[in-house]
Amino acid sequence: MPSDRMAIIEVAGACGLELLTPSERNPLVTTTRGVGELVRATLDAGARHLVIGLGGTATNDAGTGLLSALGVRFLDSSGAELPAGGAALLDLDEVRFDGIDQRLRDCRIEIACDVTNPLLGETGASAVFGPQKGARPDDVALLDRALTHWAEVVEAATGVPVRELAGAGAAGGLGAAFLTSTSAILVPGVELVMRSVRFDEQAAAADYVFTGEGSVDAQSCAGKVPWGVAKAAGKLGVSTVVFGGRVDDAIASETHGPVLAYVPIVRGITDLPTALHDGQANLELATAMACQLMLAAPER
């Protein structure tokens, strides 16, 4: 039945950081509109169960681009449509939801999200994720003010207390857009994936579990994939080794519950492009070394 069809959308495929060169990254003007166009295309194809992966975006527009593509109108005081980007939210005067695609009401929408950051403040979208998207310190302050203003207008229109919602700051505020405008629910991405691949069944027969991510830092222990995998493996009595392109000093010097060790994979001083290019080879060598150490260690 068409109503049972599932669509999986990775937002980074439409507005991802890696789609832009470093010089092109500017969250003051980047937009999530492409994500909305993907959602609309899946609805046109008959999908009514949407699984949407948040993360890795180059945007900080609170999903206004996404929602605009789905029929929501964001207007300034003169009644004109806002231009794209996070900075434009400072001029938001009115939001109109009457034109939103009504097919969304019939959809089951699961948002795969591995962070619980709020929309605003020191742990919000702009402060935590803005710098990696190209925001300078003064840009971060401007973007946080813009999101604050957006929240005031949207809360008044919807009655949803978006500033209090965990995960609203994910993907530059895309979490807030879905939570205020649809019936979407946030689901830890790692749990969704592990359920799909029957992780417990696979890990129960393992001696160790290996996982990893690009940068292992304090965020890794706040709901992201490595920590979720380690917790699940720990419940089965299996220890986890976490590999990372870089491992923060504060993390590397200690273990966290079921994590046996954090292993950096970069073998020497290098620049980021080279590290990314050599990532697969570096991971293979680091994994081989970790296995050799495990085999050489006396049984406990």
Image (spheres, rainbow, N blue to C red):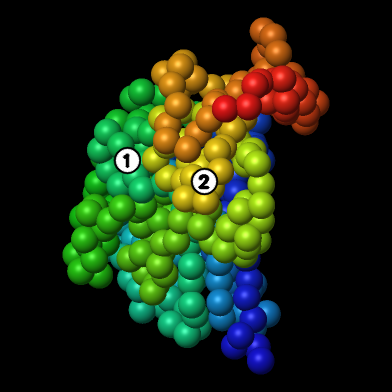
Task: Determine the residue positioned at 19% across, 65% down.
Answer: 156
Mark 2, residue position = 237
Q: Which mark is residue 297?
A: none
Q: Secondary structure at mark 2?
A: loop
Q: Which mark is residue 124?
A: 1
Q: Quadrant of the N terminus?
A: bottom right
Q: Is residue 293 above or below residue 153?
A: above
Can residue 138 be spotted in the picture? yes
Q: Looking at the image, tell me whether mark 1 or mark 2 is earlier in sequence order.
A: 1
Which of the pair 88/2 is nearer the observer?
Answer: 2
Viewer-nearest of discs 1 and 2: 2
Can residue 144 be spotted in the picture? no
Outermost residue on the top side: it is 269
Outermost residue on the bottom side: it is 1
Q: Position of residue 198 (x, y in %)?
A: 63, 62
Amino acid tagged 1: Gly
